[in-house]
Image (spheres, grey):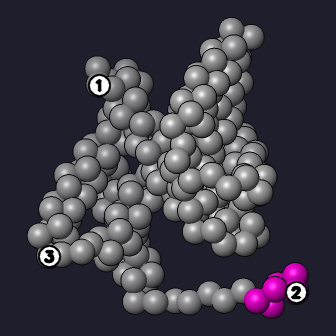
Amino acid sequence: MLFGSPLEIRVTGTWLLVILTVALACSGVNLVLHGHPRLGAGAKRPAFVSWILPAVLVGLSVYLLELAPSRPVWAVGLGLLGLVFSLTVSAEYVALSPESPGHLRARLGLNVLAYLLAFVLFTAAYGARTRSLVTATVTLLAGGFLAVDPLSVADVELRRVLPYAAAVGLIVGEGTWALNYWRLGAATGGLVLLLLFYGAVNIAQQHLLERLRPAILVELAAVAAIVLTIAVVWAP
């Protein structure tokens, strides 16, 4: 019982598999990044920050693979996971070196992956139609966790990044709580939450980089308004 309502948590074989594969993924990423010269003592961006996106990618993919309707679909999905995971780890390695020729492409790819993972998680949480206490908590944790990686591109220490990531998660969680009173489709609700996440992450990032200007706020507001209008118009 929590706040007078029943709350049940089941630990299934699928969840145990997810935990195991995430642990293996983090171990593999750490092994690949271990020798990078920018991850030595005193590095502002700790190695474990680069585990976040690969870990979420693997955990979410393994969970979805368990829902595959057939063996061929499962096999194709597993192959795609291996490919995307390899590209993600490679991008994490390249993104650690701002002077690298492929740094911008790697960082862009990682940002896109972060937003895609956020959209899937937000859509799944909102579409579950369960209690706000559960869905808001899930999106709060997911949003805050995923925000750490893109916010860490600013050349600041992690202790400065974490409060901003927590604020991003709180904004998404509060948004989820409010959206639960508005019966949108799962994808539309996930898109609205993604817009909150996108806007909060970019504002926090520009602030950490000391580049936050009114023009950036106007640009983010315009993008959000356009996407939100399209989502509402095309919502089922």
Query: Does residue 83 appear to the left or right of 11 in the view shown?
Result: left
Q: Quadrant of the N terminus?
A: bottom right
Range of the magenta residues?
1-6
Circle 2: residue type: Gly
Query: Does residue 98 appear to the left or right of 76 in the view shown?
Result: right
Give residue 158's quadrant in the image.
top right
| Separation (CA) of disc 2 from disc 3 | 43 Å
Q: Upstream in the sequence, badge 2 or badge 3?
A: 2
SS majority, magenta: loop
| Separation (CA) of disc 2 from disc 1 | 54 Å
Which of discs 2 and 1 lies nearer the camera? The answer is: 2
Read off the residue under disc 1: 102
Give residue 4's quadrant in the image.
bottom right
Residue 125 can be seen in this image? yes
Read off the residue under disc 2: 4
Q: Is residue 5 magenta?
A: yes
Q: Could you say which disc has been placed on residue 71 in the image? A: 3
Which of discs 3 and 1 lies nearer the camera? The answer is: 3
